[in-house]
Image: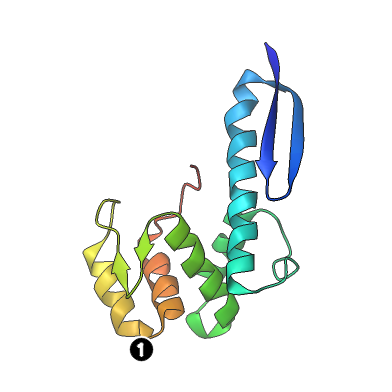
Amino acid sequence: MKFCIFVLIALGIIPIIDAKDNERPKIVNKAVMLLQRKKCLAAEGYSEDIFPSDDVSETFDIILHLASEEVPHEAKCFLRCWLKRSYILQDNFLINKNKETDAYCEREAKALAYGDECEFAFAYQKCARSLNNLTF
């Protein structure tokens, strides 16, 4: 069965025409991820060219395999925004207790953050890997 859905993204509409039923969740998830990427880049005041790929999960995989000092602060702040928009991270170094959280990783991240929420988000995500399955 084929269908046509229109996904509203920012200021325009992207037509997704003749998608098969089993492709629908992937297409919708990708659209949501692209919208969230765009909103986080705008919220942090970064250009859309800051990351080489639209594949956010690939970007996160790359930066989370690097040591903290090798990752630009901007990437850590982008990750903080993503975690907040995913309802994992809250303001003031708090983790949303309604999600699966790791108390050990939360303590470790606070110790490594030195008062910087971006560092906290990076350290927490590197330990907990709460975004392993980027679906909404």
x, y (%) of residue 120? Answer: 39, 76
Give the residue number, with chain letter if any, for mark 1.
Answer: 114
Residue nearest the observer in this picture, 53 or 5: 5
Residue 111: where, in percent of width, then height? 29, 83
Q: Residue furthest bottom?
A: 114
Is 110 on the left-hand or right-hand side of 3? left
**Farthest front residue?**
11
Q: Residue furthest top?
A: 1
Q: State whether residue 71 appears in this view.
A: no
Q: Quadrant of the N terminus?
A: top right
Q: Nearer the viewer, residue 5 or 63?
A: 5
Q: Would you place residue 17 above or below residue 27 in this image?
A: above
At 68% from the left edge and 50% from the top edge, which residue is drawn?
Answer: 10
Which type of secondary structure does the marked residue at label 1 adopt? Answer: loop
Question: Does any portion of residue 41 appear in the rendered image?
Answer: yes
Q: Amino acid at mark 1?
A: Tyr
Q: Position of residue 89 (x, y in %)?
A: 37, 63
Residue at the image point whose x is 45% and y is 72% from the top: 122
Report whether 22 appears left or right of 69: right
Crowdedness of circle 1 by 10 Å Cα count: few (<14), some, many (20+)? few
x and y percentages locating residue 117 in the rendered image: 41, 78
What residue do we see at 64% from left, 27% from top?
Answer: 23
